[in-house]
Amino acid sequence: MSTSTGSTKLQVDLRRHLREEGVEPNLAHLICELAEASKYIVNAIRTGDLGVAGTSNLYGEEQLALDVLSDRILIKRLTHSGVVSNIVSEENDGVIPVSMDCAGKYAVAFDPLDGSSLVDVNLAVGTIVSIYDGCDLLQPGRNQAGALYILYGPRTTLVYSVGNGVHEFNMNHLMEYTLTRSHIKLKPSADLYSPGGLRNCYTEGTRLFVRDLEERGAKLRYSGGFVPDINQLLIKGQGIFFYPHLTNAANGKLRVLFELNPMAYLVEQAGGMASTGTERILDICPEEPHARAPVFIGCSEDVLRAQEFIAKHG
Ligand code: AHG
Ligand code: MN
Ligand code: MN
């Protein structure tokens, strides 16, 4: 389980934590820039226009003003950071080139506002970020240099890892991020489950897996937002989330580069597992920036059991 540092004496801010962890300076700068950008996104969510942007993204999904605004805030911040080579964003086609010089730079894939349609019903949403050394974003997720998310809920929290454990920060009244939990760990087994996707499109294997979870007395907790749903299992130290292969969508819904890889990296760093149901998420070699995959992510024993049901029943 994580160690909570709720007492005020340990008011370690994000920049100090990155320095004390010996994080490579350009990577530390990038993470701090993302933290800075989140302050503008928080304000946009709290006060911004909840309407539509009048545009649609490459999926043909109508973009909300907040999707486009959050996207612009992040692209602008990263472009001027001096440490970014390329960008992929859920809200843009293809790769956005920033610098031809890869040395000492990072390639960044992000979902600027995941779950944005939940804002108008006042549910929690988040920003998800995946970071690679150099220029190339079409790599397996196991090569990530780091990953983070920012959760815009009743509190604004930032959770990151660069390979030395998973750490949570809370935005205080001065909009600074201070350390609240370090080395977050998952237990081997879950009693919370978050089943995404239409149940009447589940395959036999997933259906039997859900029945098994219910027979074990697991509680259903599903917000419809990937970031709060993953944050819940990390902070509670147990849970399993899945958005599986469906009879009408063999690759499920979530995107590998900027939703699954960063969350899989964080969950594995916390001692959990992330699978498509047949292979490790972090071993997927994405063919294009918006590739999708099914996902079972969380406590290792539950992910392994899901894989068994799918191996047996499809
Ligand atoms: P986005 O808002 O970036 O398109 O992503 C939404 C995703 C994710 O947040 C969540 O897990 C999933 O959509 C929920 O999908 P359903 O509404 O089909 O359950
Ligand atoms: Mn998303
Ligand atoms: Mn999104």
Image (spheres, rainbow, N blue to C red):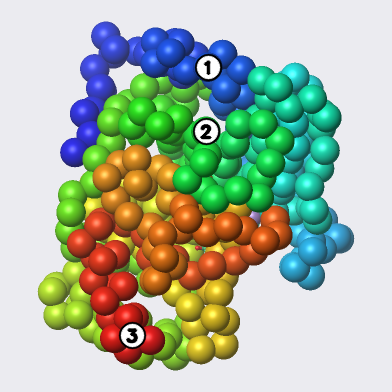
| Residue farthest toward the right in the current orientation of the protein | 54
Is there any visible trace of residue 199 in the rendered image? Answer: yes
Q: CA distance from mark 1 to mark 2?
A: 10 Å
Measured from the top left, where is residue 35 in percent x and y? 57, 27
Query: Callout 2: helix, strand or loop?
Result: loop
Above or below for 303 versus 308: above
Residue tagged 2: 145
Report the side of 179 relative to 150 (left or right): left
Disc sitting over residue 24 in the figure:
1
Disc sitting over residue 266 in the figure:
none
Q: Amino acid at mark 3?
A: Gly
Is there any visible trace of residue 258 in the rendered image? Answer: no
Query: Which numbered disc flags the more N-terminal residue, 1 or 3?
Result: 1
Measured from the top left, where is residue 278 in percent x and y? 40, 71
Q: Are marks 1 and 2 in contact (CB under 8 Å)?
A: yes
Which residue shows up at 25% across the image and 56% down it? 299
Residue tagged 3: 205
Q: Are marks 1 and 3 in contact (CB under 8 Å)?
A: no
Query: Which numbered disc flags the more N-terminal residue, 1 or 2?
Result: 1
